[in-house]
Image (cartoon, rainbow, N blue to C red):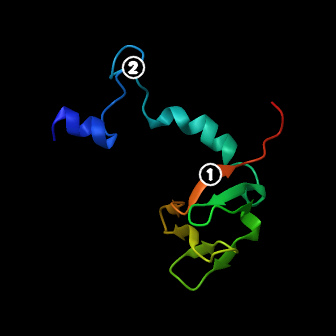
């Protein structure tokens, strides 16, 4: 893949990043923030459906448990908002049906 192709597909590192394209941290830098985020009751979070654009609390999604995991569907259009599968070693969360997730946080 040429550099121009990478830039067009969004896989190229940002050119305006401080210190150049190599000035970044690995994903471990997210650990503290994500631990704080997922240490709350996520069912009170507001999600936006990628299919119809409706917003509502995760608790309002329609959850089906007959699949190998849980499948949550939008109560308005019935499209899949998220999938959750737990294996003995991992938990997999697929949220491609959700364009945004707003989690209420206590004041810092």
Residue at (33, 22) in percent of width and height: 22
In the drawing, what numbered circle is on residue 16? 2
Q: Earlier in the sequence, mark 1 or mark 2?
A: 2
Query: Residue at horizontal 54%, vertical 63%?
Result: 97
Q: Quadrant of the C terminus?
A: top right
Provide residue 75's location: percent of width, then percent of height: 70, 75
Q: Is residue 3 left or right of residue 107?
A: left
* Residue in the image at 69% along x and 76% along y: 62
Q: What is the distance, in whole Å, between disc 1 and disc 2 at their CAs?
A: 26 Å
**Relative side of 85 to 39, left or right:** left
Q: Residue furthest front?
A: 52
State left or right for residue 92 relative to residue 48: left
Whether 30 is drawn above or below 62: the answer is above
Residue 101, how many percent across, how many down? Answer: 65, 51
Q: Identify the secondary structure beneath mark 2.
A: loop
User: Residue 77, position in %: x, y?
Assistant: 63, 75
Where on the picture, by quarter, is residue 36? Answer: top right
- Outermost bottom residue: 66
Dot 2, how many residues are within 10 Å of its Cα: few (below 14), some (14-19), or many (20+)? few
Q: Residue at x 54, y 36 (%)?
A: 30
Residue furthest left in the image: 2
The secondary structure type at the circle numbered 1 is strand
Residue sticking out furthest to the right: 107
**Residue on which the image places disc 1:** 100
- The image quadrant of residue 99 is bottom right
Q: Residues within 10 Å of mark 1 (few under 14, many from 20)?
A: some
């Amino acid at each position: 893949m040429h550099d121009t192709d990478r830039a067009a597909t969004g896989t190229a590192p940002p050119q305006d990043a401080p210190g150049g394209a190599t000035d970044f941290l690995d994903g471990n830098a997210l650990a503290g923030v994500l631990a704080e985020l997922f240490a709350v009751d996520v069912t009170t979070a507001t999600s936006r459906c990628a299919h119809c654009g409706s917003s509502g609390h995760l608790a309002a999604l329609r959850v089906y448990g007959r699949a190998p995991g849980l499948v949550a569907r939008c109560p308005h259009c019935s499209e899949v908002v998220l999938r959750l599968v737990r294996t003995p070693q991992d938990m997999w969360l697929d949220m491609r049906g959700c364009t945004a997730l707003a989690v209420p946080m206590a004041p810092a």
